[in-house]
Amino acid sequence: MFVVTADQKASRSRGDAVPELLDAVSHWAQRQGGDPFVRPLARTVGDEVQGVLADPDHVVALSLLLQRLGGWSVGIGAGPVHEPLAATAAESSGEAFVRARDAVERARGRSVPVPLAVEGADEAAAADAEALLQLLATLVRRRSEAGWEVVDLLEEVETQRDVAERLGVTAQAVSQRLDAALWHEELRLHPLAARLLTEAEGAS
């Protein structure tokens, strides 16, 4: 099981961004073809949110969404939880929750290059998952608005030609934007990140 904990950075100067975050995550969840959460992402205390997921692919996508939004320190805990889970993540417990707490504490510090950390039952796999997710997070955080425009549209239409027609540009221009956004490279790394998270979980 995977526990994702996110803590808002500089909340005193930015104001409470939790409602905006939960709204963005809700829209993301609706596009997944089913509820990706075992326990929904929700405010725990103050400006912190926490959720529980079972699918590592969803963990990868959610963690990168949080990095795209910016202003959040993200901790991922991989491992067993106490079954049955309580009604909310905040009321639940288990090793994955402890590891998520340790991870978000590290993500808040200066020991990581981007505010994202992973702790797992398999420490080596967790370290590898963290390194790869930090690389993907850096890519996501540096992607231009033009790059995001075509990436987002590809979730709504079937082909790059459809994107070009929607934007009123050439298919070549769309291809160039995707190349600059390193979109294909990112997608190819998602399964590897998910596999490392599964190994970090200690699952067979």
Image (cartoon, helix red, strand yellow):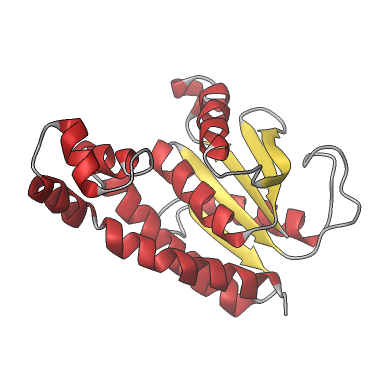
Q: Is residue 87 above or below residue 98?
A: above
Question: Is 204 in front, or is 169?
Answer: 169
Q: Is residue 23 left or right of residue 187?
A: right
Identified at 63% across, 35% down, the residue is 48
Say how many tags the image has: 0
Residue 90 in view of the camera: yes
Find residue 45 and report its horizontal and vertical position in percent.
71, 30
Q: Is residue 109 above or below residue 68?
A: below
Q: Is residue 110 above or below residue 164?
A: below
Residue 106 in view of the camera: no
Query: Which residue reaches farthest right?
Result: 84
Q: Quadrant of the C terminus?
A: bottom right
Q: Is residue 69 above or below residue 80?
A: above
Quarter residue 161 falls in: top left
Find residue 201 and report its horizontal and vertical position in percent.
69, 69
Question: Is 161 in front, or is 102?
Answer: 161
